[in-house]
Image (cartoon, rainbow, N blue to C red):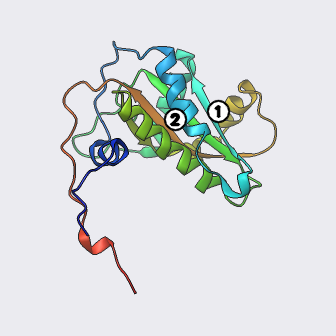
Amino acid sequence: MDTQTSFSPLDQAIAGRRSVRSFDPSRVPARDLVDAVVDAGLKAPTGRNQQSSVIIRIDDKEMQEKIRALNAKIMGTPPPGRPADPFYSAPVMLMVVADKSRSTAVYDGSLALGYMMLKAHELGLASCWIHRAKEEMETELGREICARAGLEGEYIGVGHLALGYAAGPLPPPRVPDPKRYRAI
């Protein structure tokens, strides 16, 4: 199987999309670009079409700082060579949560994040999936986020999407390990 061949724009987006860990905080994407990214996430397939995932755009700078601080605390010491800000100075913060009562909640939210990352790349935006949303949602801050977003019920944090413009060139595409594809 030739994993390097790219035929369509989608193939090219899949091959070229990379996680960015250095954003230019002074270049904020236009709202229509952010909305297009969110729209892609909302169009992602969901188990039994239950549409259990919800995307929350965090615009409030004070709330963003609270989330950054809590996420950093949950992460602990940053990995070597990584900044203390787990969102890498991204100016746009999206949070994906999902209805905890749905058996496909995490899968639905994960696919939404994947669709959003591909759409961001297509639009010339950089993105990075940020973990620890699950732990954040189990705190008072998580309950505050849900309340401010008008969500009732119990939600599990699936992940965040750090979004913006890369501070430098994108990392080179990786070469998939061919041992990850099997047939029986």
Tell me where residue 68 appears, x and y as whole percent: 47, 30
The answer to whether residue 38 is visible is yes
Q: Residues within 10 Å of mark 1 (few under 14, many from 20)?
A: some
Numbered circles on residues, count: 2
**Which badge, 2 or 1, is on the more N-terminal residue?**
2
- Packing grade of label 2 (10 A; few <14, some 14-19, many >=20) is some
Please indicate whether residue 115 sits to the left or right of residue 97 in the image: left
Q: Position of residue 110 (x, y in %)?
A: 54, 50
Seen at 52% across and 16% down, the residue is: 61
Kindly identify the amino acid type of the residue bearing the numbered disc 2. Leu
Residue 85 visible somewhere in the drawing: no
Left or right: 92 in relation to 156: left
Q: Is residue 56 above or below residue 109?
A: above
Question: Percent position (x, y) of residue 106?
Answer: 61, 54
Quadrant in which residue 47 is drawn: bottom right
User: Circle 1 sits on which residue?
Assistant: 141
Q: Within the image, what quadrant is residue 54 found in?
A: top right
Q: Residue at x 43, y 32 (%)?
A: 162
Query: Tag 1, which secondary structure?
Result: helix
Place of residue 109 in the rendered image (x, y in percent of width and height, measured from the top left): 59, 48
What residue is drawn where x is 57% and y is 16%?
Answer: 60
Q: Extreme bottom residue here?
A: 184
> Mark 2 — residue?
70
C-alpha separation, residue under disc 2 versus residue under disc 1: 9 Å
Determine whether label 2 and label 1 are within 8 Å by CB: yes
The quadrant in which the C terminus is found is bottom left
Q: Looking at the image, which is closer to me, 80 or 88?
A: 88
| Quadrant (top left, top right, bottom left, bottom right) of the N terminus | bottom left
- Secondary structure under badge 2? helix
Q: Residue at x 41, y 32 (%)?
A: 120
Mark carried by residue 83: none
Instruction: Give the residue type that dot 1 points to.
Output: Leu
